[in-house]
């Protein structure tokens, strides 16, 4: 990815030459063993303290996380974002009382909040896409979204290639795009397929079945299976992508996640009393749907993926894969023009 910034030093040991001969008689050529070799310590070194250093640094500086939500109006995108971050962070929540009109074209609107929990600060940017999929003719409605994502890569690249760079480059790149599939119970629409096919090449796409409480458990399972078949047939690689699993443990976890995608989710930002406890849920004529109860919906799986287990991985894949391919393409273009 990016080269080291001027103020930072690489923490990696210097590379050992393949073969090095000492001066003098009886010199023995040194060769590097294939791969790192375990070394027996004969006392306490304190290497693990680096984890505490990293934690302290992160708590001081905080970190950025940028998420995009895409789907037609009425699928509960704003509520879902509020449910994920347990706060009114969506665009609609920040503009209470304003009547929502569906725009005639796709518009992108971002809102940024700083969330703090147990001393850790997160600068969260949520980008909404009102107007997506709401027109009679939705042809090319993904173009403004692709343009926005690439603009953020371009902004980062321009900062990165400066001779005098900022110590910390502001990161507005989209780390994850949650795509809301309408709960039709049938197949993915051409719009869904075309959007995910195009976007999965430049950003981490996480599809979810919106308002899953409108489907029975059987309908939900069948719909999920059809979506998985559709994605496979059209060679659409959604997050977590199989190609980027390097660690066997990660692969096992990601395989379990891939079996469940798309997550069937229900959003709610209202609390209700259930068995003497306050729970986030939605009241229906059949009772309370508890959004954080895995028996009711798969919201906990989505939350864990985006925040608790894969947040850093989403950022890493964005930087090392999606941004990197954009960077290489742009620099090649510049070289050709130059």
Image (spheres, rainbow, N blue to C red):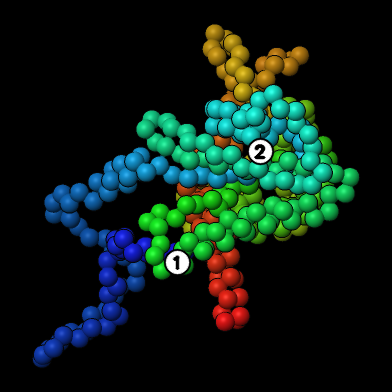
Closer to viewer: mark 2 or mark 1: 1
Q: Give residue 164's quadrant in the image.
A: bottom left
Kindly identify which residue carries mark 1: 162
User: Horizontal placement of 313 versus 60: left or right?
Assistant: right
User: Horizontal placement of 314 versus 217: left or right?
Assistant: left
Q: Give residue 56's quadrant in the image.
A: top left
Kindly identify which residue carries mark 2: 263
Q: Is residue 25 above or below residue 144?
A: below
Q: Residue furthest bottom?
A: 25
SS assignment at label 2: strand
- Counting the numbered discs, the total is 2
Residue at coordinates 63% horizontally, 55% vertically from top-left? Answer: 149
Residue at coordinates 55% horizontally, 59% vertically from top-left? Answer: 155
User: Horizontal placement of 304 versus 100: left or right?
Assistant: left
Mark 1 crowd level (few <14, some 14–19, many ≥20, 10 Å Cα): few
Residue at coordinates 44% horizontally, 55% vertically from top-left? Answer: 169
Do the numbered discs 2 and 1 sit on residues whose CB atoms are within 8 Å? no
Residue 29 makes an appearance in the image = yes
Q: Where does residue 209 sit, x and y in percent of width and height?
A: 72, 37
Residue in the foreground of this view, choosing between 336 and 33: 336
Determine which of the numbered discs, if any, sits on residue 81 in the image. Answer: none
Mark 2 crowd level (few <14, some 14–19, many ≥20, 10 Å Cα): many
Label 2 and label 1: CA atoms lie apart by 41 Å
Q: Where does residue 99 sit, x and y in percent of width and height?
A: 75, 28
Residue at coordinates 57% horizontally, 32% vertically from top-left? Answer: 89
Please report whichever mark, 2 or 1, sits nearer to the chain's N-terminal start: 1
């Amino acid at each position: 990815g990016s080269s080291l910034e001027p103020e930072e030093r690489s923490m990696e040991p210097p590379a050992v030459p393949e073969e090095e001969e000492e001066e003098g008689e009886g010199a023995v050529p040194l060769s590097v063993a294939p791969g790192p070799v375990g070394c027996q310590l004969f006392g306490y070194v304190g290497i693990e303290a680096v984890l505490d250093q990293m934690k302290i640094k992160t708590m001081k500086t905080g970190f950025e996380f940028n998420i995009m939500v895409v789907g037609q109006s009425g699928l509960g995108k704003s509520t879902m974002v509020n449910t994920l971050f347990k706060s009114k962070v969506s665009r609609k929540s920040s503009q209470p009382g304003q009547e929502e009109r569906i725009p005639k074209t796709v518009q992108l609107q971002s809102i940024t909040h700083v969330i703090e929990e147990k001393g850790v600060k997160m600068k969260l940017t949520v980008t909404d896409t009102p107007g997506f999929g709401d027109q009679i003719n939705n042809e090319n409605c993904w173009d403004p979204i692709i343009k926005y994502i690439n603009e953020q890569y371009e902004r980062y690249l321009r900062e990165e290639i400066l001779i005098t760079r900022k110590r910390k480059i502001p990161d507005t790149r989209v780390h994850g795009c949650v795509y809301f599939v309408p709960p039709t119970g049938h197949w993915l629409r051409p719009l869904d397929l075309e959007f995910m096919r195009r976007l999965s090449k430049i950003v981490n796409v996480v599809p979810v079945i919106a308002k899953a409480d409108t489907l029975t458990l059987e309908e939900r399972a069948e719909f999920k299976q059809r979506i998985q078949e559709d994605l496979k047939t059209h060679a659409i690689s959604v997050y977590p992508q199989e190609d980027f699993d390097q660690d066997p443990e990660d692969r096992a976890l990601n395989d379990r996640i891939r079996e469940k995608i798309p997550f069937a989710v229900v959003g709610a930002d209202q609390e209700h009393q259930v068995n003497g406890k306050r729970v986030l849920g939605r009241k229906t004529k059949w009772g309370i749907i508890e959004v954080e109860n895995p028996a009711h919906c798969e919201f906990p799986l989505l939350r864990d993926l985006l925040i608790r287990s894969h947040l850093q991985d989403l950022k890493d894949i964005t930087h090392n894969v999606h941004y990197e391919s954009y960077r290489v393409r742009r620099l090649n273009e510049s070289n050709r023009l130059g």
